[in-house]
Image (cartoon, grey):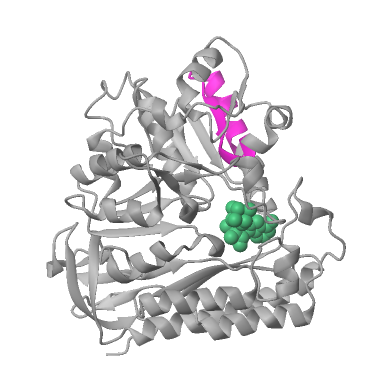
Amino acid sequence: MTDTREDTIGTRSNARKVHIRTYGCQMNVYDSQRMGDALAGEGYRTTETIEDADLVLINTCHIRERAAEKIYSELGRIRVLKAERAREGRPLTVGVAGCVAQAEGAEIIERASIVDLVIGPQTYHRLPQALERVSRGEKVVDTDYALEDKFEHLPATEPAAIRARGVTAFLTVQEGCDKFCTFCVVPYTRGAEVSRPFAQVLDEARRLAASGVRELTLLGQNVNAWSSSDAAGGTVGLAHLLRALAGIPGIARLRYTTSHPRDMDDDLIAAHGDLPALMPYLHLPVQSGSDRILKAMNRRHTAADYRTLLDRIRAARPDIALSGDFIVGFPGETEADFEATMDLVRAVNYACAFTFKYSPRPGTPGANLPDHVPESVMAERLARLNALIREQQDGFARSLVGAALPVLVEKPGRYAHQLVGRSPYLQPVVLPAGAGAIGDVVTVTIAGTLTNSLVAEGAHPDEAPARLTA
Ligand code: 5AD
Ligand code: SF4
């Protein structure tokens, strides 16, 4: 994380320092920032280097087995450092946060005795108290779901920290999930669906905008299920929130992720057509194209429902680009089921997609289903799906060559004569340095494509372009 607090807290020598490592999704990135906020109030500065830190926090992901196992190899490496530091008389406190912390709790300390603190995604506003107990020599596990709202207890992000994080920001508006897809641990690790109140979200968005944020990505495991009461006491949904956020001075772009197809209501679809700030790019996971597998996954929609929904969204916003998530090898998936997924992908034509081999998660119904698909079959299906998606992603990028696109300038490029921005479709765009200032939305003509990015006219990428169509 970016070191942002030197200017506000103490001197380099006496401020305590925290190093936060983040695994997993964007919500974990957001949570790590907010943990940084909670600790800033206690005089901690964030540091990029673990060697420099008094406290290391690992913000973990439990979504697939490999993600969860990474944490233990990470802790193995930290054990050596902690022992060295103890010999030098500079103790290192080790904390595990996030979804592995929630799922495994005290087991983490049993398995990795160097861990001093285990804190869950719903309890990290209590980090200061937990660290106080650690300083008295206790091992602390704080994962009990709080009925209180953690966001009410967290200090607001300091303006200097917002500026240091750049012109785009994540903002969690909804957490948890009540959908219980049979493969997914989220309902167990993040808990039941909860929406942050309208006024609280607006307040945070205004603070972000006042410190230079131009693009907000609203986050939630099931973000399009967000609902709250407005000032008049009526129930409002995500479209209402997006319209209100679009009215905040400085906010130029809005995005939201991740959505469930069943929660795309008419108002939200309409917002895609009539809210210019809402970017024409939607991440709408479907997971499989086979109705049999969708049923076993408890998705509660068919492939045809999904396609009909996309038709409605495309009618509202014809240039919308789509992204999705897919799982291959869910228990019982046959070659015909997999082919149905390939057919759906061919029919939709994705701008981007994320693909995963099924990973059985403890406590989820999927893990107990018969007919687990062999690893070699999963690997082969994943490769086929990835090849198709790569083709679609490249085709989409190539279709933009020659187009004039609005690009939000985000940061300096790799070379002095370049800047990097984002297209409306979330692709990085390499720009010439004179294109605009960081935070500007500039219109540029796309001259070519690199493997995962676009190149604007005049940017002269020094990297040999993979497919630069002049
Ligand atoms: N195995 C594989 N992929 C999973 N995902 C969630 N749970 C699992 C699992 N057990 C994928 C889904 C989801 C994305 C965030 O991760 O595709 O949309
Ligand atoms: Fe998991 Fe998403 Fe299904 Fe909720 S909707 S259970 S978060 S995959």
Relative to 209, 151 lies left or right: right
Q: Is residue 335 above or below residue 296?
A: below
Q: Is residue 158 above or below residue 367?
A: above
Q: Quadrant of ligand 1?
A: bottom right
Classify residue 118 by image quadrant: top right
Is residue 291 among the parts visible in the rendering?
Answer: yes
Number of marks present in the image shown: 0
The extreme bottom residue here reads: 470
Q: Which residues are magenta?
A: 76-101
Is residue 2 among the parts visible in the rendering?
Answer: no
Camera-side residue of 43 and 238 = 238
The residue depicted at 21 percent of the width and 29 percent of the height is 7
Quadrant of the drawing holding the C terminus: bottom left
List x then y, in percent, for residue 450.
37, 78
Camera-side residue of 375 and 281 = 281
| Residue 81 on the magenta span | yes
Classify residue 121 by image quadrant: top right
Camera-side residue of 151 and 459 = 151
| Residue 122 on the magenta span | no
Classify residue 270 by image quadrant: bottom left
List x then y, in percent, for residue 152.
40, 28
The residue depicted at 29 percent of the width and 42 percent of the height is 202
Relative to 116, 205 lies left or right: left
List x then y, in percent, for residue 1.
38, 42
